[in-house]
Amino acid sequence: MANPLGKISSSLAVKRARSQDSRRSHNASPTLPPIAKAPKTEEQDADVGVPAFLRQSKTDVYTKFQDLEWQQHLRLAEGRADSSSRWARDLTPQVNLRNRYLSLQPWANSRIHLKVAEGKLDYINASPISLTSAARETTYIVTQGPLQTGLSHFWQMVWHETANVAVIVMLTQTAEAGREKCFQYFPLDEEVQKFQFEIIEDDEETSPEGTIQLQETAYNEDARSTVRKLIMTVGKEKKIVWHLLFSGWPDFAIPEAEDRTALLELLKLSTTKNECMSSPRIIHCSAGVGRSGTFIALEFLLAQLEAGAIPRAGEKEDIIYDVVNRLREQRMTMVQSEIQYHFLYEVLREQFEQWQVKQVSGDKAPAEGVHQITESVTSTLLHETGFENGHEEGKNLDTP
């Protein structure tokens, strides 16, 4: 006879085994299907290796520009409160008569002083600008578009402040949208009578007269610029002046498409014409802040790209913000509008991506246009370095 207790014991053992298997199955981590990774977008691929400051959104760039505007507001407030401040301005009536726009002028402690007889006003709306990197110092003089009453002041500055070969870069037309932006301060025709101006020095009675004569004119298609060779004569001395008039920067706008490429060529051309690299190039638009500041900032940034500073920029470093701030410390309102400020990020990003492609392909040459812009400068110098209301153009985001 079969043992009934054995059957019960066997049945219980089977149930316990099934219960343990069930618990093990319940407690075991479920096997999940592999998670598919989203493919990289073209935008993500394009960002590989790009410095953080060149990956910022338009909103971030706008915020940075507003911070620059606020810094300028604080400088202006300090200058009004303290006449000894580095941000003070000379607001006397005789000085204001020499300004094209009443609210845009040099810091009083950072301006060009005309060499004039004692007791005479030495003011001209012009600022010395210096940008220094590890390898070199680049100097400029930034000024407003000359007034008819300031013709002699302008040419006197050119005579005294530049070397035997001077370079002037003009980024405005004499008239835009029916308004004068700059007086016609240079001759247009080789047959026209020479322009005359006065050189007022220590002794007014013996100060010589000066003349400006057009020797030759050519149009540079690549740079979209009219290139004039002027001969400046004071007494028995002469000086060559290269005058470059850029036609590709419309009022209230920024250079686009072919004009943008032409601007890079203009940077190169102005450097090539400047035979003495320690001699400052003279840059002007209408007010001498918007287009002029953007031109200088862009040239410096492209030189930084070639020197390798852009790829090495830290996560929290913004080289564009820093250079514009340095410019505004030397002349108010440099890179005047947000659209000009954003333009610097656009162009530098484009040039950086071209530079990346050449690096990957094994061609270590910098992006097209960058090397030529800085080659002659580097080779020569490696061994040598709330915003006030009232400016009608500033209110309309003009680009003087």
Image (cartoon, grey):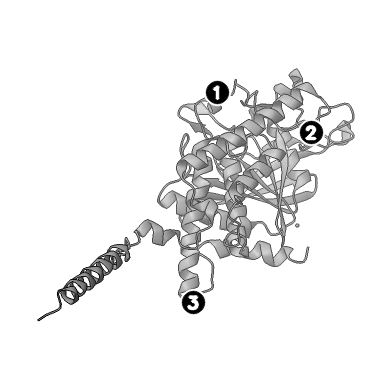
Instruction: Tell us which disc is closer to us: 3 or 1.
Output: 3
Which element type, helix, strand or loop, lies under badge 3?
A: loop
77 versus 43 height, above or below: above
- Gap in angstroms between the C-alphas marked 2 and 1: 25 Å
**Going from the N terminus, do you reach mark 2 or mark 3 first?**
2
> Is 22 in front, or is 381?
22
Query: x and y percent of residue 85 in the render?
Result: 80, 30
Which element type, helix, strand or loop, lies under badge 1?
A: helix
Q: Residues within 10 Å of mark 3 (few under 14, many from 20)?
A: few
Tell me the residue at 56%/38% (across/down).
65
Tell me the residue at 65%/40% (across/down).
194
Q: In which quarter of the image is residue 335?
A: top right
Tell me the residue at 60%/42% (across/down).
292
Kind of residue at badge 2: Arg
**Label 1: which residue?**
392
> Relative to 306, is 118 on the left or the right?
right
- Residue 223 visible in the snapshot: no
Query: x and y percent of residue 226 in the render?
Result: 52, 49
23 versus 168 height, above or below: below
**Label 3: which residue?**
362
Tell me the residue at 58%/59% (across/down).
310
Kind of residue at badge 1: Glu
- Label ID, residue 86: 2
**Going from the N terminus, do you reach mark 3 or mark 1 first?**
3
Kind of residue at badge 3: Gly
